[in-house]
């Protein structure tokens, strides 16, 4: 059974930083791309960032480019999202996701809440 467990969320002031982690168990992530997505209250879930299996390629939504950094440690089966210069509009539940080769998502975590106060 594959499980994705996010952690590291919390309450932070505008301009602060948080580092999210996504620990995967039940299957190695070493051959798959991984994503971070987020969902704000009353809004649809949206893409935040993705990283290739070997960390060679990363892509970001324009709203977080330059502030967020996705990374991974395949030996620890863990994906990270470093979030700097946080803004109130970054407030959301953040989810990690297992991206398949076809671009669909095989597994999702349960999410971790990030709240940025102004």
Image (cartoon, rainbow, N blue to C red):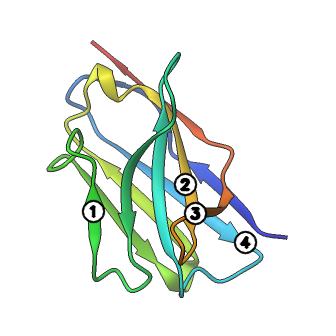
Q: How crowded is mark 2: few (under 14 residues within 10 Å), some or many (20 or more)?
A: many
The CA span between labels 3 and 1 is: 16 Å
Residue 70 on image: x %, y %: 34, 61
Task: Name the residue that disc number 1 marks.
Answer: 59
Mark sitting earlier along the chain (2/4): 4
Eyeballing the image, is 95 above or below 88? below
Q: State yes or no: discs 1 and 2 in contact (Cβ < 8 Å).
A: no
Mark 1 or mark 2: name the one nearer the start of the chain.
Answer: 1
Q: Earlier in the sequence, mark 3 or mark 2?
A: 2
Q: What element carries label 1?
A: strand
Provide the residue designation for mark 4: 25
Residue 78 is situated, as x and y percent measured from the top left of the image, at: 54, 70
Q: How far apart are marks 3 and 2 (CA)?
A: 13 Å
N-term mark: 3 or 1: 1
| Residue appearing at x 61%, y 42% in the figure | 111
Which mark identifies residue 46? none
The earlier-in-sequence mark between 1 and 4 is 4
> Which disc is residue 96 wearing?
2
- Which residue is pictured at 77% across the width and 76% down the height? 26
Label 1 packing within 10 angstroms: few (<14), some (14-19), many (20+): some
Query: Which residue is located at x 28 percent, y 83 percent?
Result: 56
Q: Regarding mark 3 in the picture, which secondary structure is present there?
A: loop
């Amino acid at each position: 059974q594959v499980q994705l467990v996010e952690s590291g969320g919390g309450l932070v002031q505008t301009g602060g930083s948080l580092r999210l982690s996504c620990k995967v168990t039940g299957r190695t992530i070493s051959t798959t791309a991984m994503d971070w997505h987020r969902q704000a209250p009353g809004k649809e879930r949206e893409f935040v960032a993705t990283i290739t299996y070997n960390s060679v390629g990363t892509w970001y939504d324009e709203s977080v480019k330059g502030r967020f950094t996705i990374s991974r440690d395949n030996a620890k089966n863990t994906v990270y999202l470093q979030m700097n210069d946080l803004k109130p509009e970054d407030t959301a539940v953040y989810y990690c996701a297992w991206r398949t080769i076809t671009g669909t998502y095989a597994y999702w975590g349960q999410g971790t809440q990030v709240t940025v106060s102004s």
